[in-house]
Image (tube, grey):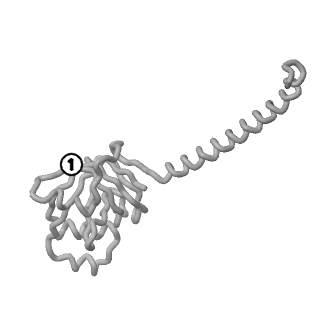
């Protein structure tokens, strides 16, 4: 049997060394984990009103939610197709079938990065049916740098769904 007086003192340095090693391992592990968490969060950008995504519908479902209503307040997610290259003051989100939804920002209160094309976006705000005039379509075509020939091809109003976002999460 081990005696309390002499043998315990012999084990004290080993326990201390083990504790120091464990502290170092724990410190390195926590530091590494913190680095991964920060790196994951750096890819997320928020604009406008901060919100928590809940009951989010995909962008291809927004038109059916608006159908027959004046407007619908909701959260939706999709992929950014285009962004205004002048300021980032609007974007288009892919809703499938070769169509997109024009997204503007409430009260012109914030902009998004001009290089957001292809990124996943979650929007909080109001969706509504809209008929865009030829002049307005041409204006947006100019904003993204389309050629005069492409702009001249726009000849009739376009029915679509629009979205006014009060908050945006970009990934």
Taking the view exactly as shown, the residue that stands out farthest to the front is 1
Task: Locate residue 22, reporting x and y percent.
Answer: 73, 38
Q: Which residue is mark 1?
A: 73
- Where residue 80 sits, quadrant-wise, is bottom left
Position of residue 73 in the picture relative to residue 50 (left or right) = left
Residue at 78% of width from left, 35% of height from top?
18
- Quadrant the N terminus occupies: top right
- The residue nearer to you, when weighing 166 against 94, is 94
- Say whether residue 3 is left or right of residue 129: right
**Residue 98 percent location from the top left of the image:** 27, 73
The residue positioned 32% from the left and 74% from the top of the image is 146
Closest to the observer: 31 or 123? 31
Q: Residues within 10 Å of mark 1 (few under 14, many from 20)?
A: some
In this rendering, position of residue 128 left or right of residue 38: left
| Location of residue 58 (image quadrant) | bottom left
User: Is label 1 in a helix, a strand or a loop?
Assistant: strand
Q: Nearer the viewer, residue 3 or 125?
A: 3
Q: Identify the residue at horizontal 18%, vertical 51% (top origin).
A: 72
- Horizontal and vertical percent for residue 134? 17, 70
Q: Residue furthest top?
A: 5
Does 37 sit above or below residue 113?
above
Pick the quarter of the image with the C terminus: bottom left
Counting labels gives 1
Q: Nearer the viewer, residue 127 or 135?
A: 127
């Amino acid at each position: 049997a081990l005696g309390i007086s002499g043998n315990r003192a012999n084990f004290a340095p080993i326990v201390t060394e083990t504790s120091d090693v464990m502290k170092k391992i724990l410190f390195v592990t926590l530091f590494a984990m913190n680095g991964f968490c920060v790196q994951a969060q750096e890819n997320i950008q928020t604009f406008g009103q901060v919100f928590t995504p809940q009951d989010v519908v995909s962008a291809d479902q927004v038109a059916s939610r608006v159908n027959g209503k004046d407007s619908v307040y909701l959260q939706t997610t999709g992929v950014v197709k285009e962004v205004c290259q002048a300021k980032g003051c609007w974007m288009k989100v892919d809703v499938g079938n070769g169509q997109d939804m024009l997204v503007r920002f409430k009260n012109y209160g914030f902009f998004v990065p001009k290089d957001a094309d292809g990124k996943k976006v979650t929007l909080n705000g109001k969706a509504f049916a809209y008929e865009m005039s030829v002049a307005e379509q041409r204006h947006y075509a100019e904003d993204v740098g389309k050629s005069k020939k492409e702009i001249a091809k726009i000849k009739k109003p376009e029915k679509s769904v629009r979205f006014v976002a009060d908050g945006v999460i970009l990934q």
